[in-house]
Amino acid sequence: MQKSSLKVGVDVPWVTSWTGEAILGVRPCPSVGGALAIAQQDSPGTGKPLYSQNHAVRQRLTIGRMLCPMCGLPTVADDRWTQVAHPVTAGTLRNGRHVEGLPASVTNDQVLIDAGAIAPLHRACVDRSLQHCPHLKADPKIDIRRFSERWLVLPLLVRAQAAPQLFLARARPPRAVAVIGFLQLVGLTDDRDPAWQGRLAAGRTEI
Ligand SMILES: [Zn+2]
C-alpha cells in the first residue's frame, strides 16, 4: 500500500487510523500493562486516513500516557486542553453508557469531566485542529477548557469471541472474553451536584 503524502501529526492527527493498518485480533498489550486488548498493525501514513476511526493502540497510549492525540507528544499539567469534554455527575455516567471501573469512592453527586475517548491536547494543537478542520469549528459541542489535574482512566471493554474449534472430535462451544478496546478518560473535580438525580429523571444530563 502507498505511503501518503499527508504528514502524520501535522495534516492528520497522530491517533487517527489508516487503511493500511489492519486489526490483528486480541493480544496482551503493553499499552494497558499487558492486559488483553485489541491489537492493530502500526503503520501510520500508509494508505488513506480514516478520520472517524482511532487507532486502537495509539488511542490507548494517548490516554494512558497523556500523549496529545494531534501531535503524539506528551502533554504537561499546565498545557492540557479539551475540545468536547463536558461536566457530568458520576451518577449520570453510571446510569448511562456502560462505564467500567468507576471506583466506589467516587460518589454519584461528584462532578466529573467526561472526555470520552479523547485525551487532552496542547493548546497549540487545539488551535491548529480548529483552523484545519471546518467541521470541528462548526461543531456546537466545541467548548475549549483546561483539563482537570486529576483523572481516572477507564477501560472500554468489548467482547471478543474465540472461534469454535471444529477440528476437534467434539466441537467446543465458542468462548467469549472481555478485552480492552479503547480507554476512556474522566477528569476529577471537587464539585458536587446534589440535584443530579432530579436532573437525570428529567432527561437532562448537562450541568
Ligand atoms: Zn500536540
Image (cartoon, rainbow, N blue to C red):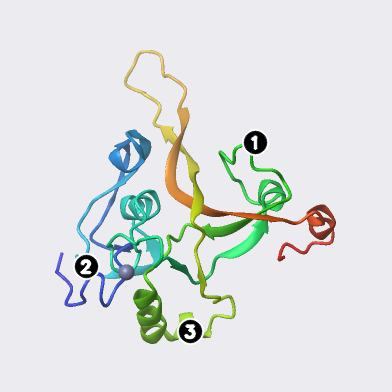
Front-lying residue, 79 or 16: 79
| Image location of residue 92, percent across then percent down | 71, 52
Q: Residues within 10 Å of mark 2 (few under 14, many from 20)?
A: some
First in sequence: mark 1 vs mark 3: 1
Say which residue label 3 marks.
Answer: 137
| Disc 3 crowd, CA 10 A, few/some/many (<14, 14-19, 20+) | some
Left or right, residue 49 beside residue 180? left
- Residue 80 coordinates in the image, percent (x, y): 42, 65
Residue at point 59%, 45% (across, down): 99
Q: Which residue is mark 2?
A: 47
Residue sitting at x 34%, y 16%:
168
Q: Residue furthest top?
A: 169
CA distance for labels 1 and 3: 37 Å
Residue sitting nearer the eye, 20 or 110: 110
Which mark is first along the chain, 1 or 2? 2
Query: Could you give the CA–CA distance between mark 2 and mark 3, rounded to whole angstroms?
Result: 26 Å
Q: Where, quadrant-wise, is the N terminus in this rendering?
A: bottom left
Displayed quadrant of residue 139: bottom right
Q: Name which quarter of the figure residue 62 lies in.
A: bottom left
Q: Secondary structure at mark 1?
A: loop
Task: Name the residue tied to disc 1.
Answer: 104
Secondary structure, mark 3, is: helix
Numbered-mark total = 3
